[in-house]
Image (spheres, helix red, strand yellow):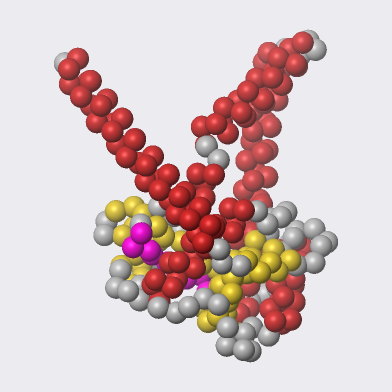
Amino acid sequence: MQIVTEHGHQVEFNAEKHVYIHNNNYVVGMSTILGKLASPMLENWKIANQVNAIKKEMERHGIPIDKIETIILNAKTNAKKQGDSILNIGSMVHKFCEMWLKGEKFTEPSDPVVKACFDKFKKFWKKHKLKLVESEKILYSERGYCGTLDLVAIDPKGNLWLIDIKTSKGIFINMVHQVHGYKLAYEEQTGKKINKMYIVRLPKDNGDFEARHILYKKEHLKAFLGLLSCHKSELLFNEQKRKLKQTQTKRKR
């Protein structure tokens, strides 16, 4: 998908690879920026340590090595399937919400979890008497990041709402940083002011929807921009490391 933003930037979004391209260069997306809150290498190290501890414990109980390896492999495969399933539920919920808001014809979700989340969203929307302004809007900030905003709506008093839909088990600090990043990019791109930010959580269990009003705080925006700076710093470090490796390879020749 290619778009031209309100401030004249051409941005391409590859949904399959989930990457943004601007002027033939990849631009960092929101999820990558927010991922800087946790070091991927540290998290992988923790997981590897846990797996090794489990292996040793099974060995201590006399379970053969080949059987242990099979158990670990099956566990990894099942964990990936479960993760993919959770992500798919979230994507489907977003899709049905968007179709309903746009007045498109569709068949009600057959998956009971997706339907329950979708029904909770409709309940939230009707309660606040909102009207759709934009959905799934691709954003580009000249600060060097992109993102896809779920919804912009307007309430009966004329307030512009920025809405991010979640199907997670809770509302966490990285989500607060996320909507602050969206707000900055949206206002920069459109010239319109966001009056309210909401994270709308649609739990996959029997609980009701949770609509959390996120107050704008400079500290939250600074935190988001700090994570963006961490990403840029990492790119510079990796580039320096790559050049050093090239230099060392040339010297060996």
Give the image location of residue 51, x and y in percent: 66, 24
Does residue 72 lie above or below 118 as drawn? above
At 51% across and 32% down in the image, what residue appears? Answer: 41
* Quadrant in the picture for residue 197: bottom right
Residue name at image x 58 percent, y 33 percent: 43
Q: Is residue 247 left or right of residue 199?
A: left
Q: Residue furthest right?
A: 206
Q: Position of residue 65 (x, y in %)?
A: 68, 13
Magenta residue check for 138: yes
Q: State which quadrant residue 196 falls in.
A: bottom right
**19 in relation to 41, above or below:** below
Residue 100 position (above or below residue 158): above
Question: As rendered, which of 137 and 235 lies closer to the eye?
Answer: 235
The answer to whether residue 103 is seen in the rendering is no
**Splitting the image into 4 quarters, where does residue 162 fall?**
bottom right
Rendering coords of residue 45 (x, y %):
57, 27
Q: Position of residue 68 (x, y in %)?
A: 70, 19
For this view, does 117 lie left or right of residue 92? right
Which residue sits at x=64%, y=46%? 83
**Residue at the image position 72 percent from the left and 75 percent from the top:** 124
Foreground of the two, 12 or 147 = 147
Name the residue nearer the viewer: 174 or 136. Answer: 174
Q: What secondary structure do most residues of the magenta stretch adopt?
A: strand
Q: Quadrant of the C terminus?
A: top left
Residue 118 is covered by the magenta coloring:
no
Task: Judge whether residue 142 can be spotted in this image.
Answer: yes
Q: Which residues make up the magenta segment?
A: 135-143
